[in-house]
Amino acid sequence: MDFFWSVAEPLLAVDGVEKSTMMGYPCLRTDGDFFASVHPDSGDLIVKLPADRVNAVIEADEGSAFAPAGRRFREWVCIAERDRERWAELLEEARTFVSQ
């Protein structure tokens, strides 16, 4: 979880971005809308992206479906690989998506 917060820290300086919780998971919101989270057990990044983008990430084997309790969230994807640059890009992509 520390890795997530270290990557997310610069976003907390952006107007409207704040720490919160979503279904008990630590998360980031922008202007009240959830856009990223971290799985409390695995530390995986969870980001909100357009459904077609989520499918592309999964098909490219770069992420997996976010499906807590077996229910898949079509606009959310989990990223297990710890890559600071990639996570920063995905966090910004997710923030931009929910800000539209």
Image (tube, rainbow, N blue to C red):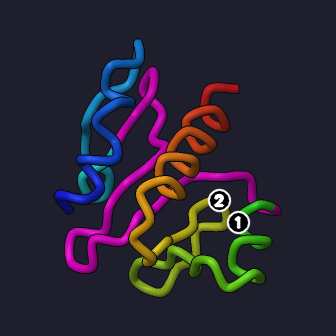
Q: Is residue 70 above or below residue 46?
A: below
Is 38 covered by the magenta stretch? yes
Q: Residue at x 50, y 78 (%)?
A: 67
Looking at the image, do the residues carrying marks 2 and 1 touch, with CB atoms under 8 Å apart?
Answer: yes
- Residue 70, percent from left and from top: 48, 87
* Residue in front for this viewpoint, 89 or 74: 89
What residue does disc 2 label?
75
Q: Is residue 75 left or right of residue 55?
A: left
Q: Quadrant of residue 31?
A: top left
- Residue 87, percent from left and from top: 48, 56
In magenta, the rendered stretch is 28-52
Q: Residue at x 37, y 54 (%)?
A: 37
Between the residue at mark 2 and the residue at mark 1, the CA separation in whole angstroms equals: 6 Å
What residue does disc 1 label?
54
Q: Amino acid at mark 2?
A: Glu
Badge 2: how crowded within 10 Å, few (<14), some, or many (20+)? Answer: some
Query: Which numbered disc covers residue 40?
Result: none
Q: Is residue 59 left or right of residue 78?
A: right
**Viewer-nearest of discs 2 and 1:** 1
Q: Is residue 54 above or below residue 28?
A: below
Q: Amino acid at mark 1?
A: Val
Q: Is residue 17 above or below residue 91?
A: above
SS under mark 1: helix
